[in-house]
Image: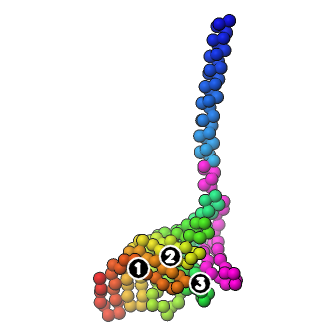
Amino acid sequence: MNRNIIWLIAILFVAGALLIWRPFSDDLNNNDSAGYRAIQPDFTAQGLVLRVYAEDGQLMHQISADEMTHFSPIKLTELNQPVYVVNTSDRVSSWQIVAEAGSFYDDKNLVLERGVRISKLNSSDFMERAETSYLVIDTTLETMETDQPVTLYGRDFVVRGEGLQADLRAQTLELTTHVQTIYTGNSQTRD
């Protein structure tokens, strides 16, 4: 009888150890596959355009891209070759910003990367365009900023600086740090 009790205890011990050990192994595998599923996109679209209108029905801004990949759980849309056009308070398209890549977070923040080009669409404006490698746009507040090197181009000048802050509604653009100004009309350079 002692021998049977010892075998029974040994079998129960081994069975208990297997039950305790086995669920941890399954949980790790399930967590890995669940995490992998969570980062799969909800959709990928080509040539999609997102337009946002004011309460009066006027177009405020639009975001288009060659390709958009949307991830609902993290409220992220990845953009390939994005183009952002914003209309001013008089509802005339005035700024166009293009880049090689971008991300749109929470239907509010647009982050543009690589080859960012900011163009004024009104040809009579003093500044024609600006270029940088990284730009963050708050589409709700209509502001944009970067801490990266920036080059501004106008009719007769080129200005280089570090960092930029702009208010698209107020039509203001400010370099955080001025580095160099080159006047091309009369060939003077100013540092």
Q: Which amino acid does label 3 sit on?
A: Asn
Quadrant of the image occupied by residue 180: bottom left
Helix, strand or loop at label 2? It is: strand
Give residue 42's position: percent from left, percent from top.
66, 60
Query: Is residue 89 depicted above or below 176 in this figure?
Result: below
The Cα–Cα distance between marks 3 and 1, rounded to whole angstroms, is 22 Å
- In the image, what residue occupies the spot 62% across and 55% down? 40
Q: Which amino acid does label 2 sit on?
A: Met
**In the foreground, 163 or 33:** 163
**Is-magenta flag for residue 54?**
yes
Helix, strand or loop at label 1? It is: strand
Count residues near mark 2 (Cα–Cα under 10 Å), then give few for <14, some for 14-19, many for 20+: some
Query: What is the quadrant of the N terminus in the image?
Result: top right
N-terminal of the pair, mark 2 or mark 3, is 3
**Is-magenta flag for residue 80?**
no
Give residue 140's position: percent from left, percent from top.
59, 75
* Boundaries of the magenta span: 35-64
N-terminal of the pair, mark 1 or mark 2, is 2
Q: Mark 2 points at which residue?
A: 144
Judged left or right of residue 179, residue 144 is: right
Q: Mark 3 points at which residue?
A: 87
Give residue 142's position: percent from left, percent from top.
55, 78
